[in-house]
Image (cartoon, grey):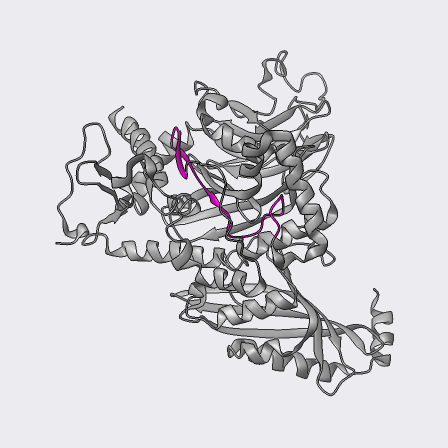
């Protein structure tokens, strides 16, 4: 997609980039503050949450390729419930998190659905070690209602290998 | 007096002193130094990684002629490829000219390899392929293979699992695998057209000694305490099936040469042939058909064993094939006493129905891998052990005695499978120290 068409579509979008940024920043705060039940409520029933392997192409298909995470709505609910337990050992005690969201773009808009991209860096600190996750995220957002809902979120890690060794947090 | 406060058991002769077995007191202990010491790692490189058969890759990863991939195994950087005629090779990834890494892409398909530094070029069968004007090199420079790519000393395969050995005099792969071949067969026979690595792999690092992952991969004892939340998940989504297996079988087996397996009825679903309610009725028919085919082809006892039982196998020193809620092939390389690089893949049935393939991958991720609902807690446990070993001067020994009084009736949540591994480790390292 070239820059001109992106801008033209953005002009027609049912939301501004500032509104999208507000949504993404609020989502990031919920994750950094471990308010995961509230975070899960951002997802529409039937939504998917995916993290393909580091360096995978944006259009990778979890039905054909091995991902790190390919959750349907039910498994995402269970993932969130799991992270609330002290037996989720990798995250007990909880790691300390902070993420930066930038380069927010509205890729396309149609019938109340926005496709959005942003860049992200997420720092995770635990046991005297800092893990860095960097990449970009692709969202499909339902913006028809009063509250926006995530229909799909895919976090693409742009590292060449998974240096932190695990994706035990929600990205 | 607790177990760890007891004085060390006298080491048997010609052993490292790092592994202590007392069959009368039912005690088996491993020195934590074996996980932390630079000299131990040096001995492992020399006596294990330079002499054992090491897993390189699966034939399906280089399925087409001229496919190649690069991989680090046993401290070497290698090219694993198929030549124009379909023959499989493993070359040291270094230009014979001045040493630059020859292949710098992770994978691809190419009719030749060319070093970017000075341009020496090679056919994919390893033969030198550049032509220089007369006078550039002396007569006979190209003959004798000194300008060809250097292959690893030994490359052999079993059921499309390719292994290398840096010891020219090693026993054959078949002899080395010993009893592990029967377990590989139980996996390799699941696909009528064979098996294949599915859609890429997971490469990650763990800040722990490499042997901790060998232990963990066949450790039935940690399953419930470490993975409570995974079993909660299975319960919540209807993924559990507590059936009784209708035939007698041995739960823990020493497969020889340090290899060991545990086999047990699966509480979870298996895309190959064991349906669970969590998957819905529409997939049931397909999965039951797969199960019926296994029984028809291999007889009821072996067919049901393939369909129903899960199996975790360690092939000494660093290959794991776990045929559980999906099949993972996993290998790991030490980078330092307290750091390893892990490569893990999903193995699936070749020409699988696309719905079953999707289910297999979905099921893999419910437990396995860096983002699974279980593996991250294993990684945490291994790193936690490694941190705990900082106390080794006072707290110097691991205990892996569970089940010793049960002898040959060891259970999957005992630790006999790890003892098989450690006995071989001790034998190989001690041999090197004595030599």
> Looking at the image, which is closer to me, A171 or B412?
B412
Point out the stretch of residues depicted in magenta: B251-275
Q: Residue B231 vs residue A156: left or right?
A: left
Q: Is residue B192 above or below residue A169?
A: above
Front-lying residue, B170 or B225: B225
- Which quadrant, please, contains the N terminus of chain B? bottom left
Identify which residue is drawn at 55% across, 66% down: B236
Is residue A86 at least partly visible in the picture?
yes
Residue A39, quarter of the rendered image: bottom right
Work out whether residue B329 can be spotted.
no
Measured along the vertical axis of the image, is residue A156 above or below residue B97? below
Q: Nearer the viewer, residue A117 or B344?
A: B344
Q: Is residue B153 magenta?
A: no
Instruction: Provide residue B222's location: percent of width, then percent of height.
Output: 38, 53
The image quadrant of residue A117 is bottom right
Q: Is residue B274 left or right of residue B192?
A: left
| Residue A16 sits in quarter | bottom right
Q: Residue at x 44, y 46 (%)?
A: B217
Outermost bottom residue: A146
Q: Give residue A140's position: percent from left, percent from top.
A: 74, 71
Q: Quadrant of the C terminus of chain B?
A: top left
At 40% from the left and 45% from the top, the residue drawn is B210
- The residue closer to the viewer here, A71 or B50, is A71
Could you tell whether A164 is left or right of A118 in the image?
left
Residue B245: image location, x then y, percent:
49, 43
Query: Could you tell me residue B265's position as x and y percent?
Result: 49, 45
- Total marks in image: 0
């Amino acid at each position: 997609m070239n820059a001109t068409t992106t801008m033209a579509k953005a002009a027609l979008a049912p939301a501004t980039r500032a509104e999208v940024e507000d949504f993404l920043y609020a989502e990031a705060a919920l994750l950094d503050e471990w308010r995961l039940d509230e975070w899960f409520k951002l997802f529409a029933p039937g939504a998917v949450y995916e993290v393909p392997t580091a360096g995978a192409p944006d259009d990778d298909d979890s039905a054909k390729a091995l991902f790190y995470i390919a959750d349907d709505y039910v498994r995402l609910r269970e993932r969130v419930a799991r992270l609330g337990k002290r037996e989720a050992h990798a995250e007990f005690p909880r790691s300390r998190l902070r993420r930066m969201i930038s380069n927010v773009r509205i890729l396309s808009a149609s019938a109340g659905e926005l496709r959005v991209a942003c860049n992200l860096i997420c720092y995770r600190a635990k046991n005297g070690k800092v893990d860095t996750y960097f990449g970009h995220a692709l969202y499909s957002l339902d913006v028809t209602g009063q509250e926006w809902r995530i229909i799909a979120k895919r976090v693409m890690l742009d590292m060449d290998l998974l240096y932190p060794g695990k994706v035990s947090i929600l990205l | 007096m607790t177990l760890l406060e007891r004085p060390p058991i006298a080491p048997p002769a010609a052993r490292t002193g790092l592994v202590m077995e007392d069959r009368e007191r039912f005690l088996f202990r491993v020195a934590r130094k074996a996980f932390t010491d630079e000299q131990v790692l040096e001995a492992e490189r020399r006596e294990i990684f330079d002499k054992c058969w090491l897993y390189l890759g699966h034939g399906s990863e280089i399925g087409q002629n001229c496919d190649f991939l690069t991989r680090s195994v046993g401290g070497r950087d290698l090219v694993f490829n198929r030549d124009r005629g379909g023959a499989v090779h493993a070359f040291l990834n270094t230009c014979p000219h001045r040493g630059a890494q020859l292949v710098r892409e992770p994978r691809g398909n190419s009719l030749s390899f060319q070093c970017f530094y000075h341009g020496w070029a090679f056919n994919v069968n390893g033969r030198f392929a550049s032509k220089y004007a007369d006078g550039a090199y002396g007569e006979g420079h190209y003959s004798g293979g000194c300008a060809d790519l250097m292959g690893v000393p030994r490359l052999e395969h079993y059921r499309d699992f390719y292994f290398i050995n840096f010891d020219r005099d090693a026993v054959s792969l078949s002899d080395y695998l010993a009893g592990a071949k029967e377990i590989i067969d139980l996996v390799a026979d699941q696909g009528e057209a064979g098996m294949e690595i599915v859609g890429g792999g997971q490469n990650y690092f763990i800040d722990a000694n490499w042997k901790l992952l060998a232990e963990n991969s066949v450790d039935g004892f940690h399953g419930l305490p470490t993975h409570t939340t995974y079993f909660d998940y299975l319960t919540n989504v209807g993924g559990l099936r507590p059936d009784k297996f209708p035939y007698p079988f041995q739960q823990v087996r020493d497969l020889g040469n340090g290899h060991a397996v545990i086999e047990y009825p699966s509480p979870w679903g298996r895309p190959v042939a064991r349906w669970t309610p969590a998957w819905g009725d529409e997939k049931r028919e397909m999965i039951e058909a797969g199960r019926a085919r296994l029984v028809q082809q291999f007889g009821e006892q072996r067919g049901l064993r393939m369909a129903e039982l899960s199996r975790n196998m360690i092939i000494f020193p660093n290959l794991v094939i776990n045929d559980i809620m999906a099949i993972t092939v996993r290998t790991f390389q030490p980078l330092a006493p307290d750091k390893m690089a892990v490569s893990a893949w999903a193995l699936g049935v070749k020409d699988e129905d696309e719905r079953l393939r999707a289910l297999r991958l979905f099921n893999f991720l419910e437990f396995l891998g860096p983002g699974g609902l279980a593996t991250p807690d294993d990684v945490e446990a291994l790193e936690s052990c490694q941190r705990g070993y900082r106390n080794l001067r006072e707290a110097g020994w691991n205990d892996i005695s569970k089940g010793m009084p049960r002898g040959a009736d060891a259970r999957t949540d005992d630790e006999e499978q790890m003892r098989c591994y450690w006995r071989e480790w001790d034998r190989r390292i001690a041999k090197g120290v004595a030599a």
